[in-house]
Image: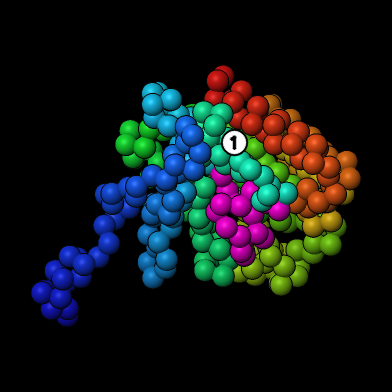
Amino acid sequence: MAHPVSDALRALIAAPHPDLAPLPPAALPAPGLRLLRGVPYGETEGGRPLELDLWLPDASDAPAAAPLVLFVHGGAWRRGRRDDMGPRTRHWAPGPFARIAAAGFAVACVDYRLSGEALFPAPLDDLRTALRWLTLRAAELGVDTGRIVVWGESAGGHLASLLALDPASTTAGAVVWYAPSDLTVPCGAYDPGNPTTPEALLLGAAPSAVPAAARAASPVAQVHRDAPPFLLVHGEQDTMVPSTHSEALAARLRDVGVRVELRTVPGADHGWYGASDGAMEDVFARSLRFARQEIAD
């Protein structure tokens, strides 16, 4: 049995729970913008704190609560950084999140547990926890969690799709770039019987060996008529996640009457490799327009 003094001391020296912890001071990365880096939003037993970066329009320029983009990074569920929208945006100045914030959004770039830390549905649970924390502290942050668009690329797009398709979700729309939509069937080089794929590492076994988990992790299997609108954008020459994934998800959404826009980019491989700078700028601009449209509806 633990000594009562030791228990009291542990409680005293522990970091404040994210629900109560003070916010860090804001950086000012550009005129009219604030940035809170490394804000804890959740705790996991025996694991690292879960953190997010929050880009905010300056409160003096945006007195009303800002609509929110929840960004989910890629990396095959195995790696990646919350502040990275992919290789084609890394040289942008201002960067993509500053651009979104300058358009009047708050942007939450969220950590989630990777497949080497915890198996599915842990990363999806982490995104739900982030939304809960943002809602809990919305007034303090100056964000409107009644107007949320989720935006993800690659594996992050997969998780963003699942979050938007959660029947309990209140998201207004989903922007999904070149993401897997079905973990249950062969596609391109992907074999659901292979226990070494990123999908298998996410699930803890070859997807064909755990069909219920593979289905639960497949956005096409979670589509329902009350889902929010989707914008799906995919490179036509994607060699890692074939564009048929977005085509299949778009078809399923249309089947149940959900508004969906599918755009494919000629000559673009995964991560927009092969696309021109102009095409990349167009993809980003169209995605931002979609987000603004959905929070305005």
Residue at 39% from the left image edge and 70% from the top image edge = 46
Q: Position of residue 119 (x, y in %)?
A: 55, 64
* Magenta-colored span: 71-87
- Compared with residue 1, is residue 72 higher up or lower down, i.e. above or below? above
> What is the residue that sits farthest to the left in this orientation?
5
Q: Main secondary structure of the magenta part?
A: loop
Residue at 56% from the left image edge and 70% from the top image edge = 116
Query: Which is more toward the observer, 192 or 294?
Result: 294
User: Is 84 colored magenta in this rendering?
Assistant: yes
- Could you classify mark 1 by the number of other residues whose Cα lies within 10 Å: few (under 14), some (14-19), or many (20 or more)? some
Quarter of the image for the C terminus: give it. top right
Query: Which is more toward the observer, 59 or 149?
Result: 59
The answer to whether any part of residue 128 appears in the image is no
Image-based side of 112 in relation to 7, left or right: right
- Compared with residue 130, is residue 192 higher up or lower down, i.e. above or below? below
Q: Position of residue 177 (x, y in %)?
A: 70, 44
- Compared with residue 47, is residue 60 higher up or lower down, i.e. above or below? above
- Compared with residue 134, is residue 8 higher up or lower down, i.e. above or below? below
Which residue, given by chain and number where applicable, does mark 1 sit on? Answer: 99
Image-based side of 5 in relation to 29, left or right: left
Query: What's under tag 1, amino acid-wise?
Result: Arg
Residue at 44% from the left image edge and 42% from the top image edge = 28
Q: Position of residue 32 (x, y in %)?
A: 47, 32
> What is the residue that sits farthest to the front in this orientation?
31
Q: Position of residue 52 (x, y in %)?
A: 46, 51
Quarter of the image for the N terminus: give it. bottom left
Disc 1 secondary structure class:
helix
The answer to whether any part of residue 79 appears in the image is yes
